Image (tube, rainbow, N blue to C red):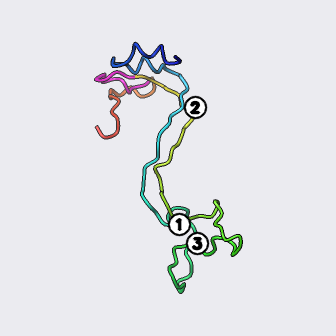
Amino acid sequence: PPYSALIPLLEKPISVKDLFSENEMIDIIGVTRGHGFKGVTYRWGTKKLPRNTHKGLRKVACIGAWNTSKVCWSVHRAGQFGYQHRTEVNKMVYRVGNKGDQKSSSTAIDLTDKPITPKGS
């Protein structure tokens, strides 16, 4: 099978240094922050209709022609905002630090002793 080289690694700890090396170019895959169901004005930034419109003003004025009586896929509509799949390509790994190393974030230019602390810790 194509994954036969990975079978011996199952249920064993893997170090980050085993996966990434310095100056390696990688692609990062993730999802954007979700914001739930949003209207067309918030989601697409369409213009608000005039103040004296009858059934609301945060809408799209015209969503298509009378016939063929179908809404085209390119017309802006309300719906899910955020939580979309994104890929950022060609990101360089500058350094792989060690946990607990107090100098893991210092560089040749910035010699301050500071650890790499992920957001939220």
First in sequence: mark 2 vs mark 3? 3
Instruction: Tell whether position 100 is magenta.
Output: yes
Q: Which residues are magenta?
A: 97-107
Q: CA distance from mark 3 to mark 1?
A: 7 Å
First in sequence: mark 3 vs mark 1? 1
Q: Badges 2 and 3: C-beta atoms under 8 Å apart?
A: no
Expressed as whole percent of the image width and height from the top left, the position of residue 32 reads: 46, 47
Judged from the image, the secondary structure of the residue bearing numbered disc 2 is: strand
Amino acid type, label 1: Val
Q: CA distance from mark 1 to mark 2?
A: 33 Å
At 49% from the left and 66% from the top, the residue drawn is: 39
In terms of secondary structure, what is the magenta stretch mainly? Answer: loop
Judged from the image, the secondary structure of the residue bearing numbered disc 1 is: helix
Q: Badges 3 and 1: C-beta atoms under 8 Å apart?
A: yes
Q: CA distance from mark 2 to mark 3?
A: 38 Å
Residue in front for this viewpoint, 23 or 65: 65
Tell me if 22 is positioned left or right of 15 in this view: right
Give the label on residue 60, or none.
3
Amino acid type, label 2: Asn
- Asked which quadrant contains residue 66, the reply is bottom right
Q: The C terminus appears in which quarter of the rendering?
A: top left
The residue tagged 2 is 90
First in sequence: mark 1 vs mark 2? 1
Question: Would you call the spot at circle 3 few (<14 residues within 10 Å), some (14-19), or many (20 or more)?
Answer: some
Amino acid type, label 3: Val
Residue in front for this viewpoint, 35 or 91: 35
Up/down of 12 relative to 119, above or below: above
